[in-house]
Image (tube, grey):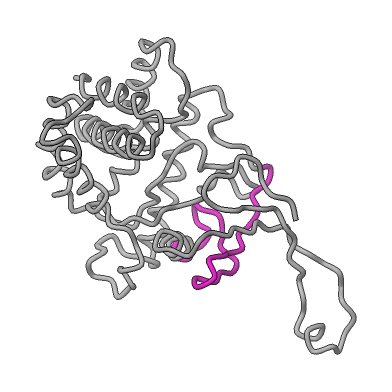
Amino acid sequence: MQSVPNLSYNFVAFAKRENVTLSEAKGLAPSSGTSQDVVLKIGVPNNELKSEMAALGLFNGNGACQILDCDEERGFFLLERLKPGTMLAELEDDDERTHIAADVMHRLWRNLESGSLLPNIQQQAVELHKFIRLSDWFDGLKNIRPHFGGGTGPFPKKLLEMVESFLPELFADKNVKLIHGDFHHYNILLSERGWLAIDPKGVIGPVMYEIGPLMLNPRRSHTDWSRFKLQTERRICILSERLGWEREKIVKWATAHAVLSAWWDFQDGMDWEYSMYCAKIFSELK
């Protein structure tokens, strides 16, 4: 077993799983010695980990890596190993990356619409309590003013008020599904089955939120923000054409997520200014 590089919150390792037939299990036949390359993921049991397991189960390998086995109580699960495992972030052509991301989103949603989970999440007899609510994430923005004694601290007041003003409109969207929740270039890998998503959060909310993390990534130091603006414009055009979404809604979700991401990073002592500057750029798009 070999751990993967760049571990963050969970332990992840490449491993092999022995393929045992029923006869071998009963001792009626010698071991064939065949094995399957897998990924072992272990984390502290919590709601987010359980949500990920449940989401992977519903995606069922369509648009996402396949979950092979899991233990909610112990916090571990076995996943299909994606080979060659190239990250979408490694591609140079951003138009190509955006088209691929749109393809993967289509596959995830098409799978849900075909029976695993119908578009109208409220009609399902699924254990919805296992999943994260997108509205709970955005409720976190209500903590900004109490944190700064009634003000907004380093967060631009005008920008925060703008997001607060259009959040009710965004959450009025009836197109609610189980979504990935952390859909970006580092969580989309190339496999023998095509490009697939990994590490879903398992979030219930309007599907258009999915473009939020995508618009911020790949994260890097931007010395040329003019180029970033042009890249953003190209992405909006591609996503609007491919997904049939209004440009204005794409911009609003991108801005809202960027502000939320900045708040998360601020609380964690990380570089929150990058997300906030992206939010400012998104908000100024016409």
Residue 25 quadrant: bottom right
In the image, 204 versus 249, the foreground residue is 204
Q: Residue at x 86, y 69 (%)?
A: 33
Against 183, is 88 above or below? above
* Quadrant showing the N terminus: bottom right
In the image, 93 versus 276, the foreground residue is 276
Residue 81 sits inside the magenta stretch = yes
Q: Residue 234 location in percent, x, y?
A: 36, 21
Residue 242 sits inside the magenta stretch = no
Q: Residue 155 location in percent, x, y?
A: 22, 27
Q: Is residue 20 left or right of residue 221?
A: right
Q: Residue 258 location in percent, x, y?
A: 30, 33
Q: Residue 144 location in percent, x, y?
A: 19, 38
Residue 122 quadrant: bottom left
Q: Is residue 190 left or right of residue 280?
A: right
Q: Residue at x 18, y 53 (%)?
A: 174
* Quadrant showing the C terminus: top left
Q: Residue at x 32, y 26 (%)?
A: 237
Task: Report the magenta residues as a range.
Answer: 57-84
In the image, 42 versus 130, the foreground residue is 42
Against 231, is 46 above or below? below
